[in-house]
Image (cartoon, rainbow, N blue to C red):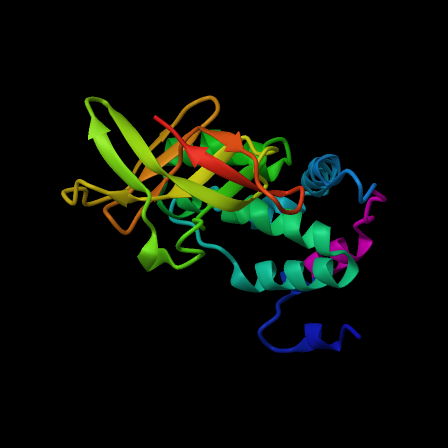
Amino acid sequence: DASFLGWPFFKERHRRLARELEAFAIPHYDHASLDAACRSIVQRLGQAQLLRHCCVLEPGGRFCVRSLALSRDMLARRDALVDFAFAMQGLGTGPISLFGSDFQRKHYLPPVVRGEKIPAFALSEPQAGSDVGAIATRARRDGKHWVLDGIKTWISNAGIADTYVVFARSEQAALSRAEVQVREHALRAFWDDEGMLVVQGRLTPDVGATLMRALEAFE
């Protein structure tokens, strides 16, 4: 029943998107190899240009919440892993979409939109769970570099991602704005002690689903 698309807060562009989502061919994948399946799904979503709603490419642009909600609803109704892959492309790049510079938007977001790069989101910790107020991971300056000290766990896309968004507390409260630096294998985004960090890390063994692993941040 697509009668809801006639509701007044949906415009013609949303109805066009709904037709694109309905026409998207859900790929067949091996449930025993979810990593490979997730990569394939992201690539196909990018080829179908459906990931364009996950990132804000233009300076001063905004997320279209209606397009995001419509996309997730229609994808999740057909396949949970496809919805998961779609959502993670936006969640893992949120710091650049919301606070990145013009250069960073133009340089780092397009590969995500095309389905060529996969981001991950590292918030939870073994002792804090997903309680942001209880996060213990710390970040401190060391000359021109930052050092992260802490452990993250239950990271969606860990092991298959190209970048990791890692939340940590900054020991330098003087930071007043987002400072974003991106390297070949890691995106670093620093705020004040309520902000985010992205850092390279190494995987540690963890018990859980294939796409949910532990990552221990290191220097």
Residue at 48% across, 42% down: 57
Query: Foreground: 32 or 111?
Result: 32
Q: Position of residue 21 (x, y in %)?
A: 74, 55
Q: Position of residue 180 (x, y in %)?
A: 33, 34
Query: Foreground: 46 or 171?
Result: 171
Q: Which residues are magenta?
A: 16-29
Quick check: is 100 in the magenta stretch? no
191 left or right of 159? left
Query: Foreground: 5 or 122?
Result: 122
Res. 75 image quadrant: bottom right
Q: Is residue 2 above or below residue 59?
A: below
Res. 130 image quadrant: bottom left
Residue at 64% across, 43% down: 211
Quick check: is 19 in the magenta stretch? yes
66 left or right of 146? right
- Judge whether residue 92 can be spotted in this image: no
